[in-house]
Amino acid sequence: MTSWVPTPCRVVERTVETHDCVTLTLRPVTGSLPAFRPGQFAMLYAHGVGEIPISVSGIPADGTLVHTVRAVGAVSRALHDAAPGTVIGVRGPFGTAWRLDGVEDLLVVAGGIGLAPLRPVLGHPSRRTVLVAGARTPEDLLYAGDLLALSDVDVVLTVDRGGHDWHGRVGFVTEPLASIPLDPERTTALLCGPEPMMRFCARTLLGRGVPAGNIQVSLERSMQCGIGLCGHCQLGPLLVCRDGPVTGYPEAEPLLLAKEL
Amino acid sequence: MTIPMTELDALPLLARLSHTQRAAIAGVSRIETYDQGVRLFDEGGLADQCWVVLSGCVTIDTAVPQNGRMVLQSVGAGELVGWSWLVPPYRWHFGATVVTPTRAAVVDTAELRRLADDDPALGYQLSLILLDALLNRLQATRIRLLDLYRNPS
Amino acid sequence: MTIGSDLEVVDMDVVLDLRGLDALIRVLAQDGRVVVGPVLRDDAITLAELGSADDLPGGWGVETGPGHYRVRRREDEAVFGHSAGPQSWKRFLHPPRRALLSSDGTGFHAAPESPVSYAFFGVRPCDLAAITKLRQVVGGPAPFVVAAQCTEPGEVCFCSSMGCGPGAGSGYDIALTERVDGDGHRFLATSGTEEGAAVLTRVPSRPAARHDVELADRDVAAAAGRMGRSMPEVDLRDLLAANRDSAHWEAVAERCLTCGNCTMVCPTCFCVSVEDRTDLDGNAERAQRWASCFEIDFSYLHGGAVRTSGASRYRQWMTHKLGTWHDQFGTSGCVGCGRCIAWCPAGIDITEEAAALARTGGGRP
């Protein structure tokens, strides 16, 4: 039963990102956590409330772990509200990571909170990176200041509804995807966001000639254990906590197209 | 200012055209550069040209009482601005403003229609290009109607 | 030792009478094991701790059907003459509720393990297969298993077509085959492990003759031909994969109450939900409890459930059981015990639903 017992970690920094998202930096109270890879997730436990899967949104070299949490339910609200000093339980790392070996041209497409699991892949000097990120409004864009400061990354930000002082794009992420310059055969695309957004983006990229095998998506299902025991995260043949969340699009497409799977 | 053919040849938008067909379009187009804030057209005005954005960004807007000009859509590099010239009453439905310094190919749409009438093969390819661009815009707009990024709580 | 061909002694096998069976229970208990086996309780054959062979449901059988289960008096005093009951060994290997850890807000402590050493007594071959499949998922210490080979399958049984019976496959320490006839009430006992063989040396028995073994083999072989039901002879994994969009799921949903009984009685359904219980001192206990994929909240993701329709939930259960279990664990999740048929209040029959899917064309033979 030890696999169910979290490592106590203290919130050492809490950054308000948007009206409903914060980024928490966690440090183990004692000892250390195993190394996380971009795309993997941890089960974060809020004392007395519950435990939910949250992707890692930053992997600093100092032994801390960074998660961006959006308050959407009881547990995520409790985590969102955790002030510096609060102890949070961490189990992980769980699941599959983004596959980046040998990638030279990286296209990162994020929608909403879907940017969080992708942030750790940005800014790697050995590859060309284009980031296309969508959000509801300019105020909902995560890490906007940090993103524009990244060297080595071409950033396209687009929102569903702009305001009077918004000078970025207004529209859906498929629109820049349809027109940005890319070398389809050499491009590896990582998609993370609501399921319909990933389906539409993948189709747009297939239309541009990007091979399906070059597209990876991050899947999401209910998870209560993270270790293939609770059964909640089944998506067809997959146990998403074990076989996902990062999945190749050829495998994911039929699962994403099936109704209520 | 005439259009350097290398720029038209590089546009994914026109990839289905032959070099000769692209040259014909270049013949009815000119390059313009616009500073930030330039108004390309206003709602109700005569629609007699369209723009292919080469670099920069243009927004499509409409006036709403109490809200001023509301931006509905951005158009960036490689995308088309302006459809109202295609169908009666040939008046702009929305307005358009340059939001970042923009370079664009401006197409004389009366001449473009003449080219298409004279050469149905070119006309057919142009129709597909416009339909493809329109479909992307329509689908993206429909997806935005889903409000996918809203907080479900 | 050869006296005559009929009485030729067969290696390792012995024959116990009822006193020997009773001794077997006592020896297992003496070694510190909690011996659990079938008992008659509340008009059903349930599982409980055994003190002696007298606790076994001697003379009781069952009649089953879709949505139907009744105990009945047998004409003999057989103790294993009943097919699967409402409970399975799952409740011991994977309890309905289990504490996981406690939290005081700053530290987390694993719940103490309860080191029960079980001996499962009278495990039917379908359930023997289920124990193997379940332990593959949930782990835990191996119980000592005394299997009871099946010589009398019930009306909802189809273990034969799932390859899980009526003979006991691997995984037992001792396998018994019961026989009641003019020569008396007796049990052929075969050891499957050295531990099982060692236990058998400590109970009164006589050596098994070739005749005893032949009778047992014949009885078990005959049982294979008396299964009340069978799965269609197609690749079930392919069948389910090909029928994700079948209209038949709607037809099942018209009958299915999404009550989850099938998942509760299934000896391999392992899903759990985890919940916190807090006290007024600010401590929390986290525990898991059995969950069912038929619960609307089972697939809850922020904002709502993924599987809201009954059709999608039945599809999930049956597809997982017969199909995607292979993808996840390399084997089928179904053993053919028939419990889900007997305990479905609407009498939905998984073999019938599989046959209906096969008739509509999906799957290859």
Image (tube, helix red, strand yellow):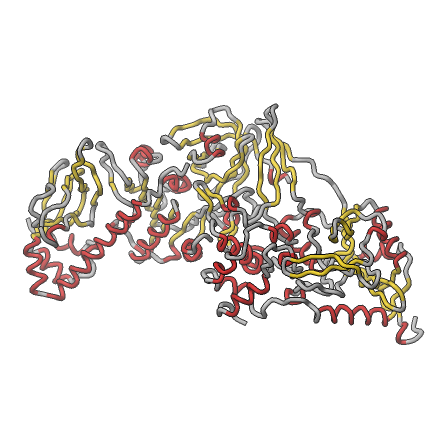
For the question of whether residue B49 can be seen, the reply is yes
State the residue in front, C54 or C345.
Answer: C345
At a point 58% along the width and 34% down the height, the residue shown is: C276
State the residue in front, C276 or A105.
Answer: C276
Identity of the residue furthest to the bottom in this view: C5
At a point 84% along the width and 47% down the height, the residue shown is: C51
Could you say where residue C247 lies in the image, as x and y percent from the top left? 46, 62
Could you say where residue B65 lies in the image, as x and y percent from the top left? 17, 33
* Residue C11 in the image: above or below residue B150: below
* Residue A142 in the image: above or below residue C55: above
* Residue B86 in the image: above or below residue C2: above
> Quadrant of residue B14 in the image?
bottom left
State the residue in front, A156 or C299.
Answer: C299
Could you say where residue B69 lies in the image, as x and y percent from the top left? 17, 35
Q: Which quadrant is home to the N terminus of chain C?
A: bottom right
For the question of whether residue A229 can be seen, the reply is no
